[in-house]
Image (spheres, rainbow, N blue to C red):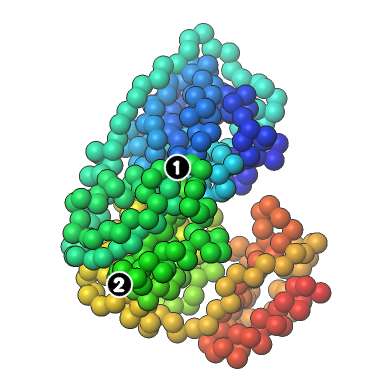
Amino acid sequence: MGIFKAYDIRGVYPKELNEKIMEKIGRAFADFIKGKNIAVGYDMRVSGPKLFDAFVKGVTLQGKNVINFGLTSTPMAYFASAHLGADGMAMITASHNPKEYNGVKFTREEAIPISGDTGIMEIKDKVDKEEFKKVTKIGKVTEKDVKEEYKKHLLSFVKGIKELKVVVDCANGMGAQDFSLIQKELLVDVVPLYFEIDGTFPNHDANPMKKGVLEVLKKRVIAEKAELGIAFDGDADRVFFIDNEGELVPSDFITALISEEILKHKSNSLVLYDLRSSWIVPEMIEKFGGRSLRCRVGHSFIKQKMREDSAVFAGELSGHFYFKDNFFTDSGIITAIWVMNLLSAKNIPFSELIRPLKKYFNSGEINSEVGDKEAKMKELAESYKKGRVSWLDGVRVDFDDWWFNVRPSNTEPLLRLNLEAKTLILLKEKKEELLKIIRS
């Protein structure tokens, strides 16, 4: 079954993922989780309630109890799971995928993620074989509204937010619920875009990384003379930012800026950053008294590394930002709070705040179709063996004045290239050189 992915379950409803399959997934997950109580929520997708009911039926058929916290964002689901002391959690969502998709994200106790390597393939095997434990007593379902506790948790991250004008694009997704919980407690003047929760996504896809999706937000920030634009994805675990000049702020710059703010309160702490990030990120972390550590891409890897090393914060280029004080999980709304914190503290335009970070030149991510991904990466490592070669995630090679990383896609015959250089001329030269090898 192709719906079982590296980090979650996703498929088109009802062709690939339907109530019959979801009930089996619920049964398999219930058998997989050692404890008795499983928290379950769902997002705004039209198929959500039906798939939720099927999943809950599967869980209770296996004798496990369900804590139903209803319509929720993924960050609130993580919070609910950890806050309520659930033994496992299932969030019915397909994140930023188009409206016809749905899926499930899983965690163990304390919101510890379950990936392909740590349980999803085991759940798949149980579903495929339909081998479920025999039980004598069906589990119970209890409803629990955690919004007030979640609101208090979110407000604990607010540190002197001043009167800012902010345009917020929720894409008709769950970011609307999260932002609305705290909006009245802040001094900010909010210009709302698409706050009506609607899983048909009538205005635009709930994927801020998709070309064109942020154009309305960019124009509105300029028209409103706002200090900031905020864009959430569908389940609100990812977030992107627009500066006062209507330009997208790179996510690695956000990692650098939030690191500075967090390190004011927690000096000498460890911050993780994804290996595609600019050199400016570790430079900024260390400048402000922190310790930096490069890590591989992917939420389950980052969360595990954060727990192992007690990192206070981590950021990814994909718009995921992780906080130790949020059970080591990612949260769009907490990230937005931190950005409003730092804009209030600095009291200068966002565009001026990020200008010093534009020290290097980067390519962005460039995809190339490749037959033998492993062989091609080995060829690159051999071609550039005079540099410092790392196999942390794909192949990365660092030189004194430039670096590149090439990673394989998990699901497609693609290699993803990122490179950065100290000059634009060198960037263009090395980009051409690398693509010639990759695409030969």
* Residue 423 location (% of width, % of height): 55, 89
* Residue 76 location (% of width, % of height): 36, 42
Drawn side of residue 438 relative to residue 36, left or right: right
Q: Type of residue at label 2?
A: Lys
Q: How many marks?
A: 2
Q: CA distance from mark 2 to mark 1?
A: 28 Å
Picture quarter with the C terminus: bottom right
Name above or below for residue 175 compared with residue 374: above
* Residue 192 location (% of width, % of height): 33, 55
* Residue 391 location (% of width, % of height): 63, 66
Indicate the secondary structure of the residue bearing disc 2: loop
Residue at point 41%, 16% (across, down): 140
**Residue in the foreground of this view, choosing between 334 and 32:** 334
Q: Type of residue at label 1?
A: Asp
Drawn side of residue 102 relative to residue 305, left or right: right
Drawn side of residue 182 relative to residue 412, left or right: left
Drawn side of residue 399 relative to residue 307, left or right: right
Residue at point 45%, 39% (across, down): 43
Q: Which residue is mark 1?
A: 198
Name above or below for residue 423 compared with residue 66: below
**Residue in the foreground of this view, choosing between 79 and 347:** 347
Q: Which residue is mark 2?
A: 225
Indicate the secondary structure of the residue bearing disc 1: loop
Can you see residue 147?
yes
Residue at point 45%, 42% (across, down): 198
Name above or below for residue 156 compared with residue 360: above
Report the residue that reaches farthest toward the top. 136
Picture quarter with the N terminus: top right
Tell me which corner region of the image, top left, top right, bottom left or bottom right, holds residue 401.
Answer: bottom right
